[in-house]
Amino acid sequence: MSMPGFAERNESIPPVAAIANGHLAKNALAPRETARVLIADDHTMFREGVRALLQGDERLQVVGEAADGVTVVRMVSQCKPDLLLLDMSMPRQDGMAVLEELAQSGLSVKVLVITAMIDSQGILRALQLGARGVLLKSETGRILLDSIHRVLAGGYWMGQEGVNSLVDLVRTLSERKDQGVTRFGLTARELQVIASVVGGYSNLEIAQKFSISQQTVKHHLSHIFDKLGVYNRLELALFAINHHLIESC
């Protein structure tokens, strides 16, 4: 089973890194509510290429660009974007430092990390700091758009190159927490909530799906986190897939 947000590469569409050369993916998505996007990357040509791609999608509005990490946090505060496309390698302050500062500031923005290389430990740290996904710059423009809309909808995105190592990391964490325990003591409702999280549902959508309050959903998630020894929704999703929990729902 693959995580929500995974996509097979379509080689007929140019990679993200090649967008700046003028190869733009066609947008066939229906227009919806416009989302505000901030692009943070130190390469002017890359920013211009991504901007051109996003401007072809009526659901997205580019509200600013940042060329270094110090500028990013200031622009997030000023522009109030819904989504930040964040390069991890930038001058003055790198992407990880930006994530740490955003986490401490309490600024509300969904972050999609765009990077040239995948480092499993770095990815896990970025996700723990609040990033909603990681995308390689070698991916296609179509996948970039898909990942953006997935994250804006409340889901997570992980490039296929990074998922196996992340699962290994979560497996190590879960084995350390389990210490030989083979049953997790999950209730039928908790298993349903887990399946919904893996499916990318928000707390509100889970509440509506099972006719319960959002507060009840939060209580379920708190109990689930305690029982499984995970700390956020992404770790829960990876743990559930690794341990085949959703097959029990």
Image (cartoon, grey):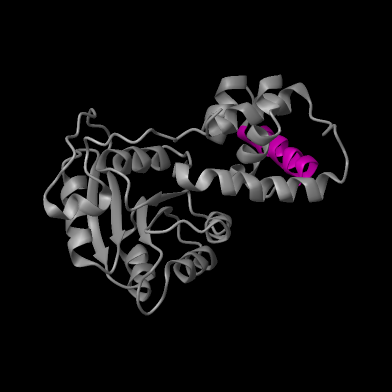
Left or right: 108 as drawn, with respect to 58? right
Could you tell me which quadrant the N terminus lies in?
A: top right
Instruction: Determine the residue located farthest toward the bottom in the rendered image.
Output: 92
Identify the residue at image location x=37%, y=41%: 147
Left or right: 186 as drawn, with respect to 249? right
The magenta span reads 214-229
Tell me residue 191's x, y (percent). Answer: 70, 26
92 falls in the magenta region? no
Instruction: Determine the residue located farthest toward the right in the rendered image.
Output: 180
Q: Is residue 249 visible?
A: no
Could you tell me which quadrant the C terminus lies in?
A: top right
Identify the residue at image location x=42%, y=42%: 151
Left or right: 22 as drawn, with respect to 51? left
In this orientation, which residue lies closer to the viewer: 30 or 179? 179
Tell me residue 180's x, y (percent). Answer: 88, 41
Identify the residue at image location x=22%, y=38%: 13
Say if 109 sits above or below 102 in the image: above
Tell me residue 14's x, y (percent). Answer: 21, 43
Left or right: 208 as drawn, with respect to 158? right
In this orientation, which residue lies closer to the viewer: 24 or 220? 24
